[in-house]
Image (cartoon, helix red, strand yellow):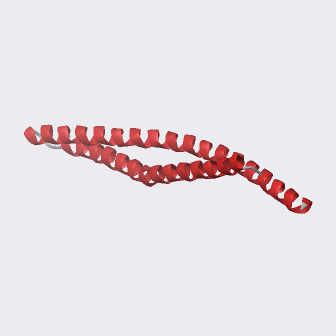
């Protein structure tokens, strides 16, 4: 087993670690984004319903606030969906990199075992 093959295995393991780190980072923010999006969207809807019962400038101000909350909620939900798609892509990359690494690792182990048997 040559130095190039060992370097390849180390690089592949490093790539797997990097992908895993990216995945963990995105997963950490995903739940927050879904929760914030749902919260602001519901807050916007509640303010629209409540402001419909008022009259005059109070209603106008609350409707504007409700619109801003709704837009903020939609943005958070959009970011969460985008992050969700990126996580699916990263998981696919992680699966393929892990499969290649495992295949190469098994091959390296068989080469090492064969060289020990020959000695």
Tell me the quadrant of the picture where the C terminus can be found.
bottom right
Point out residue 74 in the picture as x, y percentages from the top left corner: 35, 38
Residue reaching furthest to the front = 119
Nearest to the observer: residue 5 or residue 91? 5
Q: Residue at x 46, y 42 (%)?
A: 83
Q: Residue at x 40, y 40 (%)?
A: 79
Image height of 71 relative to 27, above or below: above
The number of discs equals 0
Residue reaching furthest to the left = 57
Q: Is residue 106 left or right of residue 41?
A: right
Nearest to the observer: residue 63 or residue 9? 9
Give the quarter of the image for residue 111.
bottom right
Q: Is residue 94 left or right of residue 49?
A: right
Q: Residue at x 86, y 62 (%)?
A: 116
Point out residue 103 in the picture as x, y percentages from the top left corner: 75, 49
Point out residue 70 in the picture as x, y percentages from the top left corner: 29, 40
Point out residue 6 in the picture as x, y percentages from the top left corner: 69, 51
């Amino acid at each position: 087993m040559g130095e190039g093959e060992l370097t390849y295995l180390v690089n592949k393991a490093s790539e797997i670690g990097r992908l895993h780190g990216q995945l963990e980072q995105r997963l950490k923010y995903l739940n927050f984004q879904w929760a914030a999006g749902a919260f602001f969207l519901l807050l916007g809807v509640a303010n629209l319903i409540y402001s419909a019962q008022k009259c005059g400038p109070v209603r106008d101000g609350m409707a504007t606030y409700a619109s801003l909350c709704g837009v903020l909620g939609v943005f958070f939900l959009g970011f969460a969906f985008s992050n969700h798609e990126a996580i699916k892509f990263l998981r696919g990359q992680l699966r393929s990199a892990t499969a290649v690494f495992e295949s190469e690792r098994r091959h390296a182990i068989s080469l090492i075992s064969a060289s020990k048997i020959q000695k």
